[in-house]
């Protein structure tokens, strides 16, 4: 069952479920970038350091038009653990970028796992919110279909995190 703000968008090799987008007008022009970004997040996931949880996460972000990747880096002191999304964003910030355009997340969750098992944590959402704008899209990797097509969700950031904390 779909809600009024949910629709499906298909591009050559990808089937996307979309949430919170008022229109699909932007999606055809972004389709290749979105697929490439999810594939980059999958690549980053292979470099994750997750000896404690065994749950690898990769992320790829486009900030001010440039791509940055990150993976989760666990630590024996759990508070020292870095999430993939924050690692990618921190790399972009260190390079002088400030506007988050698109971000993709790929996890070790099984193909077709519920969004709740593949979605960014609250801290990552807050960090994304520092740099996200009204047009920012979040891409969640849902694995591959039986026919080999990539599947995923496209979520408007404000739908993912509508009441983020803001100063002032």
Image (tube, helix red, strand yellow):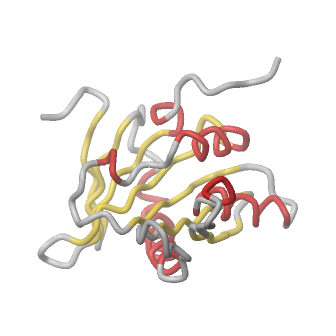
- Seen in the picture, residue 96 relative to 46 is either above or below; the reply is above
Image vertical order of residue 157 relative to residue 124, above or below? above
Which image quarter is the C terminus in?
A: top right
Residue at image point 87% right, 61% down: 96
| Residue that appears at 44% across and 55% down | 139
* Residue closer to the observer: 157 or 59: 59
Residue at the far top: name it: 168
* Residue 128 in which image quadrant: top right
The N terminus appears in which quarter of the rendering? Answer: top left
Q: Residue at x 58, y 63 (%)?
A: 84
Q: Position of residue 14 (x, y in %)?
A: 29, 67
Task: Residue 42 in the image: state x and y as whole percent.
Answer: 44, 75
Q: Is residue 168 above or below residue 21?
A: above
Which quadrant of the view contains residue 54? bottom left
Q: Is residue 159 left or right of residue 148?
A: right
> Which residue is at 65% across, 60% downward?
77
């Amino acid at each position: 069952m779909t809600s009024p703000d949910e629709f499906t968008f298909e591009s050559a090799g990808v089937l996307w479920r979309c949430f919170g987008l008022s229109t699909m007008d932007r999606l055809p022009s972004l389709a290749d970038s979105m697929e490439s970004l999810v594939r980059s997040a999958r690549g980053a996931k292979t470099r994750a350091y997750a000896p404690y949880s065994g749950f690898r996460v990769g992320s790829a972000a486009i900030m001010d038009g440039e791509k940055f990747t990150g993976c989760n880096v666990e630590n024996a002191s759990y508070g020292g653990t870095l999430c993939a999304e924050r690692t990618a964003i921190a790399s972009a910030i260190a390079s002088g970028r400030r506007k988050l355009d698109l971000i993709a997340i790929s996890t070790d969750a099984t193909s077709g796992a519920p969004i709740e098992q593949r979605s960014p944590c609250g801290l990552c959402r807050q960090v994304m919110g520092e740099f996200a704008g009204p047009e920012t899209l979040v891409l969640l990797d849902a694995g591959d279909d039986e026919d080999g097509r990539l599947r995923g969700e496209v979520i408007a950031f404000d739908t993912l995190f509508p009441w983020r904390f803001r100063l002032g």
